[in-house]
Image (cartoon, rainbow, N blue to C red):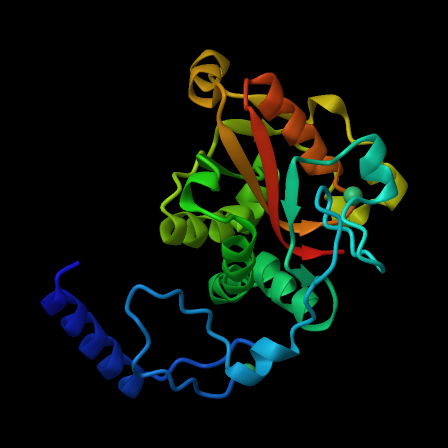
Amino acid sequence: MSQTLEIVQAATKLLADWIVPDNCVLCHLPLARPWAEPAALEDHLCAHCRTAVTLNLQSCHHCAMPSPSDQTVCGRCIVSPLADYTLVPVLHEHYGAYLIKRLKFHQGEREAKALCGFMLTSIRLSYATEESLPDYLVPAPIASKTMLSRGYNQAYWLAQPLGRHLDIPILNGSFKRRNGPAQRTQTRAARMRMPADTFTARRSVHLKKQLAQRHIAIVDDVLTTGSTVRLLTNKLRQAGARRVDVWAATRA
Ligand SMILES: [Zn+2]
Ligand SMILES: [Zn+2]
């Protein structure tokens, strides 16, 4: 980007912030960041609230289940790892749970950016080089019935800023999720028994060419039992993906 364009963008932002100041998504106080880099992700959080969010600092590398010791693989993943690598920076409690609720049920696009801020920090710490980053991001699909009532896929709202900042293309709509009862209305046991045909690949021949030997990251909002991503991971592997990682915002 040319320097003139950057100066114009910074000046426009400064003016816009002065006319309509941005507020923190948690405490709602005005945010003052006049000299923020135009290319930086605006996470709509003040410095105080950013530190008040509970982070998932020590967890299993394959399923991001919080680990009380410095054990990097949990008992379940020793037998059957959820994914090649799973990254979930925030715990699904207090502010983390509130941000997800806003994202899912109140068209929380600003809350999505707040969660993406934590995800980006964690991604940059976890992937040593740009070459080690995934080739594609796959937002976890939602059922058509949910899409109709909600109007958007919250996983796509997370994948979009991540893809833009990391320069990774998004594969959206490659898999279809069948309609069924909403997961939040089901017991943990029922969630664990998700039918194997929950996801189907669209245009599978084309998809196989696209995914062959590729490194994929599934992007989702909350990781709970992991049943959803396990099924999707299997589908991606069947379609030829070499490595499948999972990036979610909060760990329940
Ligand atoms: Zn705040
Ligand atoms: Zn694990």
Residue 108 vertical placement versus 203 (above, below):
below
Residue 22: x and y, percent?
40, 80
Q: Quadrant of the N terminus?
A: bottom left
Q: Quadrant of residue 181?
A: top right
Relative to 18, 157 lies left or right: right
Relative to 202, 233 lies left or right: right
Residue 43 vertical placement versus 247 (above, below):
below
- Pick whichever, 145 or 4, lies toward us: 4
**Would you say residue 30 is visible in this rendering?**
yes
Q: Quadrant of residue 161?
A: bottom left
Relative to 77, 103 lies left or right: left
**Would you say residue 27 is visible in this rendering?**
no
Farthest top residue in view: 205
- Pick whichever, 216 or 26, lies toward us: 216
Ligand 2 image position (quadrant): top right
The residue drawn where x is 50% and y is 88% is 29
Residue 10: x and y, percent?
22, 75
The residue drawn where x is 85% and y is 31% is 79
Q: Quadrant of the C terminus?
A: bottom right
Relative to 225, 146 lies left or right: left
Residue 159: x and y, percent?
48, 48
